[in-house]
Image (spheres, helix red, strand yellow):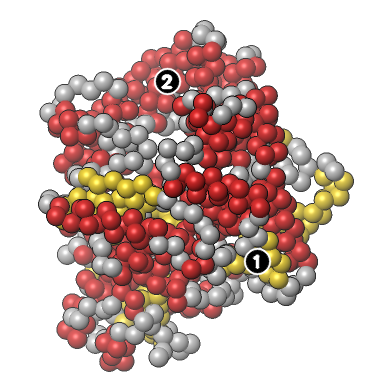
Amino acid sequence: MPTLHADFETRSRVDLFRHGAYQYAADPSTEIICMGWAFDDDEPQLWIPGDSIPDKVVEHFERNETASIHAHNAQFERLIIKHQLVKHDPRLANKLSLDTFYCTAAQARARALPGGLDDLGACLGLSVQKDRRGKELIKLLSIPQKDTNEFRYDEDLLQEMYDYCLTDVTVERAAAKATPSLTDDEHWDWVVSEMVNDAGIKVDVEFAAAAADYADEEVAEISAELSEVTGGRITSPKQYQRIKEFMSTVMVSDERVRKAMTTVKIDRRTGDEQRRISLDRDARTKLQALELEEPGTLPDNISKMIELVAEAGRSSVSKYNNMVSRAGDGDRVRGAYIFSGAGQTGRYSSVGLQVHNLPRNTAQDPDAVRKDVLDRVELVGVMDTLSSMLRPSLIADHGHQYVCGDWSAIEARVLPWISNSDGGEGVLDVFRAQDNDPDLSDVYEVAAANLYGINPSEVSKDQRQIGKVIILSSGYQGGYRAFQAMARAYNVTVTDEVARDIIRSWRADNNWACELWSETEAAAKDAVKMPGEIFTVGRLSYFWPGGTAPLLCQLPSGRILSYPDPQLSSYEGLNGVETELTAIKAQWKPKQGEKEWGRISLYGGLLAENATQATAACVLRHAMALAIEDEWPLVGTTHDELLLEVRDDEVAEALEALKAIMLDMPGWADGLPMACELWSGARYKK
């Protein structure tokens, strides 16, 4: 069966980036400018509206063969074919099966490469590159002109657009050939994710619009207060550079404040510290903690400014606006998930609605808050209140409820399991015992008990919180600063000395993890030193074919993680001559004028983290596929959750079914203990 490569150029009155591909493709104002297409390695051809669509293209669509239509960001091409191309030929009226499409952007992301075609071509160093003129052509031809509010028609520019479209087909095809194709399992996982995107998540649009207005007003008040307390030097909480400069100028003489505002990064090659002044969330938290410990440390205007900036940081304005602008048919936001969008691991990321970044805190009585906002009742703590309503703004359809399952401490279970060590089994035994008897101490209480030298049953709530931070921050070779940063996220503050003691204690009690870090780093380096040889650590295997191929890590599931362009280098470190293994990091684009892609250091903790999170993602993909195969309406998958939207009379059955699905471990996960928590309700929550 031949492969059809396709690419569309379009125009519309709908803002694609604001409203998303689903609304864009379906809008009556959307039109096709041209379609570039080619079978296999044939010369790309052009179709223009008004011409007949070639019979062999239509016949290819009608055959509906799996993975036979290739496109970069295939979701867009799929939707344009469904809503627009069908208007030009009645033979296309039959709906194409979703699995007919194959996404070359998903292939790139699955190989730890950039998903954007221009970045992908540059990163791979392809001889043919995406034409950067395309962005200008889109501004000129694909959106209405500001002065006339009409589309521009220009024969010369249209010819440029046609050539640009044909070049895209060539570049997409070349980029796809440069990396391994998606396996059948990976392609099916992508199809499942597109099913979830097609289903969409319903938004309480009426409330989201009212909340956005409420937040806009609050931000305006915050901006006015900022101007007052800074003498007019700062007029918006978004003026980050001015805020940092103001802080640096006013607080330069106070070493404690300067330390709290200083972000420190350690160069692993030299041991040098790289410092910069910041007023990010972490810095604001440290400054507020300093003021709580020693009232009066900060001048009144600085303290007030930090409070206002922190308050505005919880504004949620953009999130509510995104809910409103991206809600389409049935008030549902579609296309929120990006398959394999999270770096090396293959986990999902999100776009537009940003479901992976919704605050964990949830309003206790969302219906009451909703009524107050719609009635314009004055709220106490406006931004905190609106932030707590972001999750509840996602709602089940009338006569339906959400049924949600969340795996318990999945990463804390997977990490010791992939180590395949006696020490790791000891950790897993704690989980097994607690899964069988919920009254027993959990792993966080055990970690806290080891730290404080007490019985797990005596661990207090605050001590358990420390135990949770220990488990989450220490398993990937994080140092005391990483522990402190995560502790602050859980509203726990500890001194440098205490943090160092905690890390030392945890590593002493969990030597299996230290060995895993060391052995994974050694195995990855050995694989690069000895191309063609396989090096196994625990349940992981590292292999480098040599040449321009990426370093590969085979997970227990058989899925492969890629580390593009692996390089070993020697340097004079703190302990003499040391070696460092690096690889291209897709998200670290070169600065303007530079060609070298950013590289990431592949130390043991990072490799263990990647493998753990990737294995957890494999468990998630397996469960998603089971839910779809059992015909349960899967509408979301955020972090380690599965979200179904079922009829009211199906809730009890769905809860049982979802639990069974989530605890049905694949054969490769033998010995991995798993537990999950479930809830049901009309609104999304945590």
Q: Nearer the viewer, mark 2 or mark 1?
A: 1
Q: How many marks?
A: 2
Q: Please tell me which residue is depicted at 42% across the width and 20% down the height of the picture.
A: 307
Is label 1 in a helix, a strand or a loop? strand
Q: In front: 534, or 325?
A: 534
Q: Is residue 313 visible?
A: yes
Q: Is residue 595 visible?
A: no
Question: For the residue carrying disc 2, how many other residues have a C-alpha within 10 Å: few (<14), some (14-19), or many (20+)?
Answer: some
Note whether 306 is above or below 609 in the view shown: above
Note whether 280 is above or below 443 in the view shown: above
Spatial separation of the CA atoms under disc 2 and disc 1 = 49 Å
Residue 255 horizontal/vertical position (percent): 65, 17
Residue 611 horizontal/vertical position (percent): 58, 57
Residue bearing the label numbered 2: 307
Dots 2, 1 in contact, CB < 8 A: no
Residue bearing the label numbered 1: 541
Q: Quadrant of residue 392?
A: top left
Q: Is residue 271 left or right of residue 206?
A: right
Amino acid type of disc 2? Answer: Glu
Is label 2 in a helix, a strand or a loop? helix
Residue 138 horizontal/vertical position (percent): 36, 63
Q: Is residue 181 left or right of residue 140?
A: right
Q: Which mark is residue 33?
A: none
Q: In front: 666, or 285?
A: 666
Q: Quadrant of residue 547?
A: bottom right
Q: Quadrant of the C terminus?
A: top left
Q: Please tell me which residue is depicted at 56% across the width and 68% down the height of the picture.
A: 560
Q: Please tell me which residue is depicted at 14% across the width and 55% down the height of the picture.
A: 649
Question: For the residue carrying disc 1, how many other residues have a C-alpha within 10 Å: few (<14), some (14-19), or many (20+)?
Answer: many
